Image (cartoon, rainbow, N blue to C red):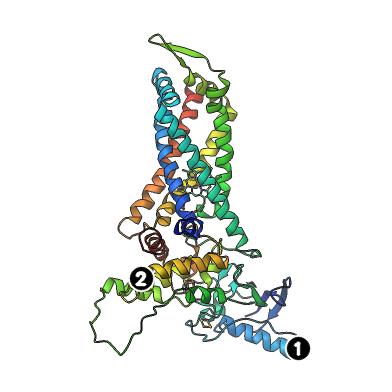
Amino acid sequence: MDFKLKIWKQKNAGSKGKFVNYEVKGISSDTSFLEMLDILNEDLIYKGEEPVVFDHDCREGICGMCSLYINGYAHGPDAAITTCQLHMRKFKDGATITIEPFRARPFPVIKDLMIDRTALDTMIQAGGYTSAKTGGVPDANAILISKENSDLAMDAASCIGCGACVASCKNASAMLFVSAKVSQLALLPQGKPEAAERVLNMVAAMDEAGFGNCTNTGACEAECPKEIKITNIARLNREYFSASFASEL
Amino acid sequence: MSWFTSTFTSSIGKKLVMSLAGLFLIIFLLVHLGINLMVLLENNMYFNKTAHFMGTNILIKIFEIVLFGGFIIHMIYALFLQIQNWLARPVRYKIENLTNQTSFFSKYMIHTSVVILVFLVIHLVDFYIKAKFIGDVSDVVYNGKEYHDLAALVEAKFLLGGAVIFYLIALLFLGFHLNHGFQSAFQTLGIDHKKYTPVIKFLGVIYSILVPLGYACIPLIIYFAK
Ligand code: HEM
Ligand code: SF4
Ligand code: FES
């Protein structure tokens, strides 16, 4: 398969970027999207040109590093996958593919398609954890958790912190990400003691970082590779109201 | 910062205020529609007497201030949040496919709201300002008491084709705004559950169709039937 690529090139956060056109030829339909970029880069290095910088790590959909906004979709035109799980057979032979970095003020471009997602870590550091010493391994069933809550918490915990929710939200809001962590911990007894403090601190860190405000469009849940649902955002709001209006904080 | 300031300057706190104001406006629209529909009755007395009551009763007058407050708070918060949202993405995407959003009209809330705002100003000038401050309204007498003939004012207005079309367009956009707004307000309040969210969404769709349609009846019936 042959493709025309329109790729965003940008030297660093301070500089103005622009699109550069490339072509790749003879790509197998089983090539993954990132492998296709590898092939392009090998070609560029061979020709003595500068390769395209992009983020990746596990290449199996668990680390969340691969970003890329492909033809108008975070992680490309397929639901519930990361970019590393996208294959070239999803595209038509000869197609033009536009590749942009995830764009949001809190995600400055490091170079080309690589962005700095430290803002997500900053929000986790603000409260996305429990601070109790856990001690040794507890007896099974020492802490009882209902099946429903354990399932909901597990679903929320599957967030890999990729930032696709921010990238695909028209407001660049990080509510889905924050709601996943707040929900995961608020649903479990171990997370309850610090629930109020956590939600207040994480929301403050989110606002501080300059993310936009949620307008309940649902774009985030449509693009989330782990299919985190916006019911978590409603739970985040409830947690926030109860922490603000009912807690001692 | 006090808990109060930090709550109401936070993103979620601001959304809370605007969703409550929005829900308040949703209730207001129902009451307003109920009264407006009286103008279609054969006898204009009912409408004129109700309008007189709404214009003079002290409780209603206090409520009128609350209503203006609701509009202003909703608009100021909406604008403020929207500006922050634009600033959160200084470099826009070249290609943006927002097709798989769950709510289509959610993309255009600020655009539909501009149409509603323009309509609101013209609507207030058309009826409210005329009746209240300019006073170029003829009077009618029921049981020896004088009332403004506001029904005649409405009827005169909607004999003009241009006014009818303008009102219909504005109502269409109001429907678009409420199609997302109704259910969005509940989500903002944290009310989201598989047991009742489908009901809320259904009611929202019904509301956003029936209420604008109800309002639209008035200019249409007056224009074509009277
Ligand atoms: C009778 C008139 C109106 C009603 C009943 C109404 C109702 C609503 C409701 C219920 C929401 C959803 C709130 C939320 O999600 O938390 C909303 C959102 C919004 N409203 Fe209104 N509104 C009205 C007029 C206006 C006007 C005049 C403006 C601006 C000038 C405006 C601007 C907005 C904006 C920008 C949003 C989007 C926020 C979002 O997407 O969540 N609205 N409206
Ligand atoms: S909520 Fe989904 S889209 Fe957002 S960071 Fe987590 S996994 Fe990525
Ligand atoms: S590279 Fe790890 S999720 Fe894609």
The mark lying in front, picked from 1 and 2, is 2
Return the x and y of residue A131 as percentages of the image width and height: 39, 80
Please tell me whether residue B92 is drawn above or below residue A29 in the rendered image: above
Instruction: Look at label 1 and name its amino acid.
Output: Lys
Task: Return the residue nearer the eye: A5 or A171.
Answer: A171
Return the x and y of residue B211 as percentages of the image width and height: 42, 39
In space, the residues marked 1 and 2 are separated at their CA atoms by 54 Å
Image quadrant holding the C terminus of chain A, namely bottom left
Image quadrant holding the N terminus of chain A, namely bottom right
Mark 1 and mark 2 lie on one chain; the one further toward the N terminus is 1
Labelled disc at residue A47: 1
Return the x and y of residue A147 as percentages of the image width and height: 26, 74
**Cβ atoms at labels 1 and 2 below 8 Å apart:** no
Label 2 lies in ligand 2 vicinity (Cβ under 8 Å): no
Instruction: Look at label 2 and name its amino acid.
Output: Ala
Task: Return the residue nearer the eye: A25 or A132.
Answer: A132
Please tell me whether residue B226 is drawn above or below residue A3 in the rendered image: above
Residue drawn where x is 50% and y is 29% of the image = B219
For residue A162, side relative to residue A230 (left or right): right
Residue reaching furthest to the right: A48
Q: Circle 2 is placed at which residue position?
A: A186
Q: Quadrant of residue A54?
A: bottom right
